Image: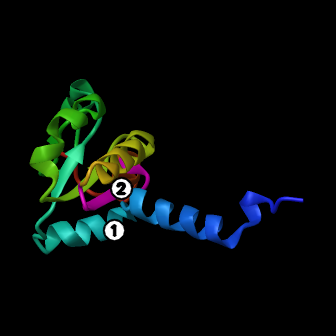
Amino acid sequence: MPENIANNPTTQCSICIYSTLYTAYKNITVNELKIMMDEKANITIIDVREPEEYANGHIPTAINIPLHELPLRINELKEKNIVVYCASGVRSKASAEMLSRNGVQNVWNLVGGLKAWVNAGYPIEK
């Protein structure tokens, strides 16, 4: 009887390596991001929401690159330290995964998005 592939240690190791290589982004909390901003860390903060959402309020210094435009901008982002966020974290997680899979090595997803930022009492710009 053939061995179950899912229980094969080699297969499990391959899955683990694949997951590590292709979900290389990290999560960051609003408090960690605020500290990085206060320390003037070399980061590019990207709001992946739609322009109308961005215009209604965004994290200071953030630039707006909507999720659907990110694939067109990957080359300019590859050498940067990127923090992505959206309203609550769903679009930014997809963005972080996509950027990581396409060679952007330093990517952080802001957990909870702008909602968590505002709930923590941090400022927004319009």
Cα distance in 3D space between marks 2 and 1: 10 Å
Looking at this view, name the residue that lies furthest to the top: 52
Q: Tell me the quarter of the image containing the C terminus.
A: top left
Q: Which residues are magenta?
A: 104-113
**Which residue is under mark 1?**
31
Res 117 quadrant in image: bottom left
Placement of 108 over or under 50, stated as above or below: below
Q: Using the rendered image of the protein, determine whether residue 6 is visible from the camera's viewpoint.
A: yes
Q: Residue at x 22, y 43 (%)?
A: 58
Q: Secondary structure at mark 1?
A: helix
Colour scheme of the picture: rainbow
Classify residue 57 as left or right of residue 26.
left
Question: How far across and how far down the image is residue 38, in percent?
Answer: 15, 71
Res 122 quadrant in image: bottom left
Question: How far across and how far down the image is residue 55, in percent?
Answer: 19, 30
Res 74 quadrant in image: top left
Residue 84 magenta: no
Say which of 2 and 123 sits in front: 2
Q: Which amino acid lies under the numbered mark 2 shown in the image of this protein?
A: Leu
Placement of 105 over or under 116, stated as above or below: below
